[in-house]
Image: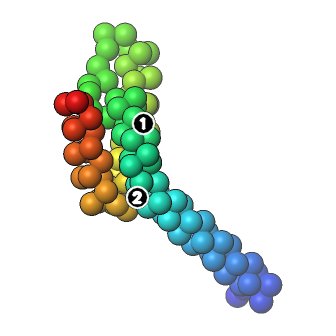
Amino acid sequence: MEMPDETARRESAQLKARLRQETEEADYRWLMSTVQGRRIVWRMLERSGVYRSSFSSDAMAMAFNEGNRNSGLALLATVSNLSPAEYVEMMEEATNDAAD
């Protein structure tokens, strides 16, 4: 059986964690809501190697590349889940920028 102080501490910790999560999600939505933010995210995805193979004949280089790619995949999952329409818009903008 939990003591009242323990219950209050647990509930407070859960509330803080939920607020942190909501703030993080709002930050990503804000970032993806601007052209500049989408350009930043696109550059981060490109630099992380999400859109290319991480293969290298050097095992350590490949491990490094795969670590970068894993970070990029986490970013990709976040922005595509939280801002799917803006993610598509970002891809279109990047395609248009590349064509110019």
Separation (CA) of disc 1 from disc 2 = 16 Å
Q: Earlier in the sequence, mark 1 or mark 2?
A: 2
Comparing 100 with 24, the one in front is: 100
Callout 2: helix, strand or loop? loop
Comparing 25 with 41, the one in front is: 41
On the rendered structure, is 3 left or right of 99?
right
Judging from the image, the colouring scheme is rainbow
- Residue 100 tag number: none
- At which x and y percent is residue 8? 74, 84
User: Which residue lies at the image location 27% right of the left edge and 60% below the top edge?
Assistant: 85
User: Which residue lies at the image location 37% right of the left edge and 19% below the top edge?
Assistant: 62
Asked if residue 93 is positioned above or below residue 60 in the image, the reply reads below
Residue type of the residue flagged with mark 2: Ser
Q: Circle 1 sits on which residue? A: 44
User: Which residue lies at the image location 62% right of the left edge and 75% below the top edge?
Assistant: 14
Callout 1: helix, strand or loop? helix
Residue type of the residue flagged with mark 1: Met
Q: Circle 2 sits on which residue? A: 33
Residue reaching furthest to the top:
57
Count the labels in the image.
2
Comparing 29 with 13, the one in front is: 29
On the image, which quarter does residue 32 sit in?
Answer: bottom left
